[in-house]
Amino acid sequence: MPEPIVSIREAEIGFERGNPLLVDVDLEVHPGEIIGIIGRSGIGKSTLLRTIAGLLPPLSGHIDVPTGRGDVGYIPQRLGLVNHKNVGYNVMMGALPRAPFWQTLFSLPGFELRQSAREAIDAVGLSDKVLDSISQLSGGQQQRVAIARSMVQKPAILLADECLGELDSETAKEIIELIQNLAKEENIAIMVVDHNPVRVATFCDRVLHVKGTQIEEVVV
């Protein structure tokens, strides 16, 4: 088995010392692996992803994640898209973490990054929506934009928080296929928070159940 992309040892995760959401977290995530995370609302699933993404420090313990620019991709529940900008703009923003400093400074991706953005937009089936603003898109189309943005970022690990929430079954199936292709073809490790335990069992290699302050692996 390859070396893990993420390694967590004896970690406490949450917002307040002495009152953690999760304790004794021990977890390894490997390249090409899809991990589903389930559990009731407010129990710490999103906080776990935000901690792995480096947006929150662990309360204690050790978390080793890739530290290169763009190595960690993160799709929050609200997607983080710029609603008044078009699809092409939003996807190209995903390329900036890998771009030279001057391109990042002026938000001006070069030709190769623009080409990568076009290819990602084609891959998620939105080639006819490049100039449409995000506010004009359906929820499923916005999810595709968020995934395309992550594709051009080329992360080592992608963290997706409820990226299947409130989608109809057909659109959810299409998003799942995109996730599976990213893991298989790009060897990206993917962690997906989802409220549907039956669904995650159908496409994830492993399922983690956040229960109380513990994380338990579910046999699928």
Image (cartoon, grey):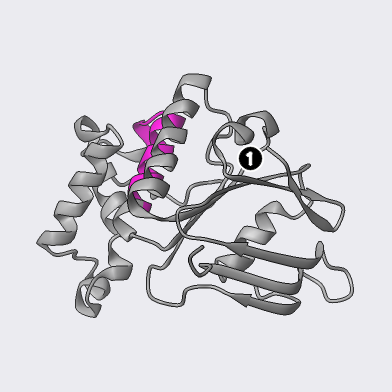
Can residue 14 be seen in this snapshot? no
Instruction: Decide which of 213, 99 is in the foreground and name it.
Output: 213
Can residue 179 be seen in this snapshot? yes
Residues drawn in magenta: 135-150
Q: Helix, strand or loop at disc 1?
A: loop
Instruction: Decide which of 184, 74 is in the foreground and name it.
Output: 184
Q: Main secondary structure of the magenta part?
A: helix
Residue furthest out toward the left: 111
Residue furthest out toward the front: 1
Q: Is residue 196 left or right of residue 202?
A: right
How far from the left and from the top, in percent, is residue 121? 25, 41
Give the answer, above or below, for where 166 lies relative to 2: above
Does the stretch in magenta take in 142? Answer: yes
Q: Residue at x 26, y 33 (%)?
A: 126
Give the answer, above or below, for where 142 lies relative to 12: above
Q: Identify which amino acid the numbered label 1 is placed on.
A: Asp
How far from the left and from the top, in percent, is residue 171? 45, 25
How far from the left and from the top, in percent, is residue 205? 57, 44
